[in-house]
Image (spheres, rainbow, N blue to C red):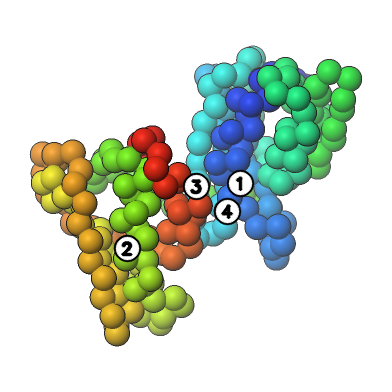
Amino acid sequence: MKLFQVKRDALLKPLQAVGGIVEKRHTLPILSNVLIRRKQRGLSLVATDLEIQVSTGCEEVESDGEEIALTVSARKLQDILRALPEDTATTLDLQNNRLQVRAGKSRFNLQTLPANDFPMLADPGALLATVSLGQGQFRELLLLVQYSMAQQDIRYYLNGLLLVLEEEQMKLVATDGHRLSYIAGQIASQQQQFCFVPCCCCCCCCFVRARFAPKSNGRA
């Protein structure tokens, strides 16, 4: 059964975006997989390590039929796409619980696992606030406070950081009980004031540092 057809780069970029948290070796094999959902309008890709969940989408696909979800090895699929020439038309088929990747005369078969076994984090509900700022700016703010965060402290709230959105400022505070770091950065004006603690753990900060370019003008 044909899942979808897409250009190699259109699928590789979102796969790289979520693949950063996928561990090569894990006690749960499905955590090495990426969840792929075929929707009526595009794809969604999700990866998790049980602490962080990253999701993205791909709309540049040609697909027909009902919605289908499956999981497949993120590393292996990424390696296959990297080996293909740029802008190659790639077709993904599902046959007997195996994902077949076709590009030109090449054929690759990957074992899949049921999408129902993929561990999704709980739905956080309605968003409290939305902020738009440069990737480089957000990365720099995290770098200036991350070193003060505790790691694996029994006081779990010290393993994260305090993030406050107040009018035209984003304030970040981190402490491990012995030292404290604080930084404030300018953001777009907020209609209301919000103060919340998103469980922004050390792993999450490291992921952002690795994925966000230091001097990028892209929005986060």
For label 1, the SS is: helix
* CA–CA distance in space, label 2 to label 1: 26 Å
For label 1, the residue is 19
Q: Residue at x 60, y 25 (%)?
A: 10
Say whether disc 1 or disc 3 marks the residue closer to the N-terminus: 1
Q: Nearer the viewer, mark 4 or mark 2?
A: 2
Q: Which mark is residue 21?
A: 4
Contact, mark 1 vs mark 3 (Cβ under 8 Å): no
Q: Position of residue 186 (x, y in %)?
A: 18, 47
Residue 109 visible somewhere in the drawing = yes
* CA–CA distance in space, label 1 to label 3: 11 Å
Q: Residue at x 32, y 65 (%)?
A: 145
Q: Give amino acid for label 4.
A: Ile
Q: Give amino acid for label 1.
A: Gly
For label 2, the residue is 144
Q: Residue at x 72, y 17 (%)?
A: 89
Say whether disc 2 or disc 1 marks the residue closer to the N-terminus: 1
Of the 4 image quadrants, the one containing the N terminus is top right
For label 3, the residue is 211
Q: Position of residue 151 (x, y in %)?
A: 44, 76
Q: Nearer the viewer, residue 153 or 189?
A: 189
Residue 53 vertical placement versus 90 (above, below): below
Q: Give amino acid for label 3.
A: Arg
Left or right: 25 as drawn, with respect to 195? right
Q: Nearer the viewer, residue 92 or 106?
A: 106
The quarter holding residue 90 reads top right
Contact, mark 4 vs mark 1 (Cβ under 8 Å): yes
Contact, mark 2 vs mark 1 (Cβ under 8 Å): no
For label 4, the SS is: loop
Q: Residues within 10 Å of mark 3 (few under 14, many from 20)?
A: some
